Image (cartoon, helix red, strand yellow):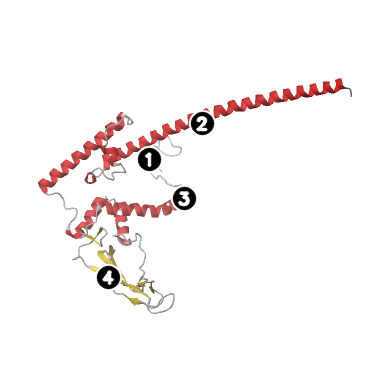
Amino acid sequence: MTNEEELTRLRMRVTELEKANAKERKKIDALDKKIGSLVKENAELSEDVQVLSRAVRAGEEKLRLSLFLRFGSSSEKYRKLFNIPVELLCKEEEGSLSEEEKKILAQAKQAVEQQCAKNETGSQETGGRNRNPESRRRGNGCGRQGFDPSYPRQRKEFMLADTCQSCGAGLVDIGSPDVHEHIDIVRNSLHIIQQARHKGYCPDCGETHDAKGVRKRTIITASAPSRFIPGGLAGDSLVAASLVDKFFYGLSVTRISKRFRNLGIELSEQNFANWHLRAGSELKPVAQAIRDYILTQPAINGDESRLQVLDEKGRSDTLDSW
């Protein structure tokens, strides 16, 4: 191969490489344009997400304020009213709020102030209703409602086991049981049940000494039967009876509360409402199972109304048909 032929071959190779390089540059330029458009689109989407998030937050705030205006408790004033923060109710109108939100805020403040003034006037004139009578004085140092001490009690003792489960030694009762009271229905009458869970320790494995020689004891508490609402004011029978009153006899929680108040037990409407919500959440799987069973049947409901049908073949117009 001569030098001229070799030079011609190299020139052709250079031309091919330049064409391939031009094609790759076009691809790179196209990808750069695509990346630029994607970045721009991403920025626009991010801005849309921020706008929608602000709209959702504003809608939630308006909903909470609307619920407050309808159901808010005026006695709590501006605190913990359907999660409405104090700053939102007390702050001055800002440019970030819409006119509708400013109007709702003003209505909320005005409603609370009017209700508070009305309550103060009513309490001065009539003394108001005593919502914390002596029979509902707080006890146990934790704000839990207590019951009238004159009401009959039914005490149930839950004793410790005779021996320690770990080492088999005899347990020592320290003589200060944990007493928990709840109200329940026993044989169609109300009883206050006292659950006395005795406490003790094991002298062998439940008693230790630290580096300073101070004696420490591991306290063991006797177990008691579990209830539907552990540690609650109501026993299982009382919760069941209130559910029957509510959903079978159609009584409101206000009437249920009054009915038990006439029997000598002060239980608020909020107590019964909370118990019913708790029972509803626990019974949800049962309701779902009943619904699934009903939907598997060939017919859910049948109408047996008797009507006169005109021009029915083989029957007179005066006869009733099913």
How far across and how far down the image is residue 13, in percent? 78, 24
Q: Which residue is mark 1?
A: 307
Question: Which comes sooner in the sequence, label 2 or label 4?
Answer: 2
Front tag of 1 and 3: 3
* Above or below, 105 relative to 229: above
Secondary structure beneath dot 4 equals: strand
Residue labelled with disc 3: 292
Mark number, residue 79: none
Q: Amino acid at mark 2?
A: Asn
> Residue at 33% across / 53% down in the picture?
276
Measure the alpha-carbon separation of dots 2 and 4.
Answer: 69 Å
Q: Give the residue at mark 2.
A: 42
Say if mark 2 contacts mark 4, CB within 8 Å. Answer: no
Secondary structure beneath label 3: helix
Q: How far apart in space, not on screen, are marks 3 and 4 (Cα)?
A: 44 Å
Q: Earlier in the sequence, mark 1 or mark 4?
A: 4
From the top left corner, tell me how far across and down residue 170 is, in percent: 38, 79
Q: Is residue 47 above or below residue 168?
A: above
| Residue at 72% in and 25% down | 20
- The Cα atoms of the two marked residues, 2 and 1, are separated by 65 Å
The answer to which quarter of the image holds residue 118 is top left
Q: Quadrant of the N terminus?
A: top right
Q: Position of residue 93 (x, y in %)?
A: 28, 32
Camera-side mark, 2 or 4: 2
Q: Amino acid at mark 1?
A: Leu
Q: How crowded is the residue under tag 4: few (<14 C-alpha within 10 Å), some, or many (20+)? A: some
User: Which residue shows up at 45% across the image and 53% down it?
Assistant: 289
- Taking the view exactly as shown, the residue that stands out farthest to the right is 1
Q: CA distance from mark 1 to mark 4?
A: 63 Å
Q: CA distance from mark 1 to mark 3?
A: 33 Å
- Disc 3: CA contacts within 10 A as few (<14), some (14-19) or many (>=20): few
Q: Which residue is mark 4?
A: 155
